[in-house]
Amino acid sequence: MNDPAAATRPPAPRRRWRVAFAGLLAVAFCGFIALGVWQLQRMAWKHDLIARVDARIHAAAVPAPSRAQWASVSDANDSYRRVSVSGRFVPGSETRTQAVTELGGGFWLLQPLQTDDGDRVLVNRGFVPIGGAVSPAPEGRVVVQGLLRMSEPEGGFLRRNVPAEDRWYSRDVAAIAGARGLPVRDVAPFFIDADRDPAVRGWPRGGMTVVTFRDPHLSYALTWFGMALLALVGGGLLVASERRLRHDRRLRRPPDPHVLPPG
């Protein structure tokens, strides 16, 4: 016995393919929405971070963390905090790390400061361009103010530090301390980007820390939401196509011979 409804149904393989494709679009839609929401959450976190860092930079300087506080110093809570430390620079222990600034290529000049408490803190005295004459560190007791920065282990972008050859591409505190014969346990796990000293006319030039944060999260979120919209449109087109095919099959279905024509 013929089933008239069977003529309106697509072949089983094609029907399974359409169901699978519709399921894939549903999963993609949910995934894209989740990614978009995650990017909005990341944007809120980034804006909060920027606000906190901006507040630290413009706050009054506070004493740099003491040895008892070193273990609790973290990137999230202390990076770019304005601090001050007093002591004497250790002569003959400068380290040059590669730098690219608005003034061109050159290097950062790092030098240990022995604090009044007997500990040591690496101080980034500032930028020196290629060929620039370096002024010696001031003698005697000094007070250094600047921004607390966390150590930069391993090296720079695609460049690893080579301590044996005294080639440095990042400010890796532990590695620099070891290369200069300083007991690592006596060296703070951070360094200080010194402020610019207006009394210094030559090099190094302090106060050149660039504080920037990439904030592409809104554009990423819009991209994911756009992809979700495309998945939704694709689902709508699939449903419309299925309805159109069913309509076309009904029109092409031969008349039932058992049904008499009207009239």
Image: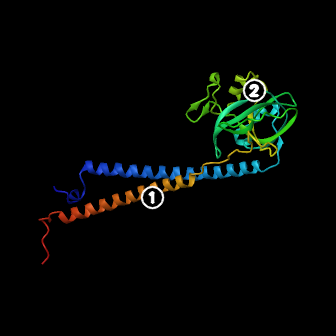
- In the rendering, at what x and y percent does residue 220 appear? 53, 52
Kind of element beneath mark 2: loop
Q: Where 44 sits versus 105, above or below?
A: below
Image-based side of 46 in relation to 196, left or right: left
Q: Quadrant of the C terminus?
A: bottom left
Residue under label 2 = 93
Q: Where 80 sits versus 114, above or below?
A: below
Residue under label 1 = 229
Q: Residue at x 76, y 22 (%)?
A: 183
Q: Nearer the viewer, residue 116 or 39?
A: 116
- In the rendering, at what x and y percent does residue 137 appear? 80, 34
Image-based side of 220 in relation to 116, left or right: left
Gap in Å between the C-alphas at discs 1 and 2? 60 Å
Q: Residues within 10 Å of mark 1 (few under 14, many from 20)?
A: some
Query: Which amino acid, mark 2?
Result: Ser
Q: Quadrant of the N terminus?
A: bottom left
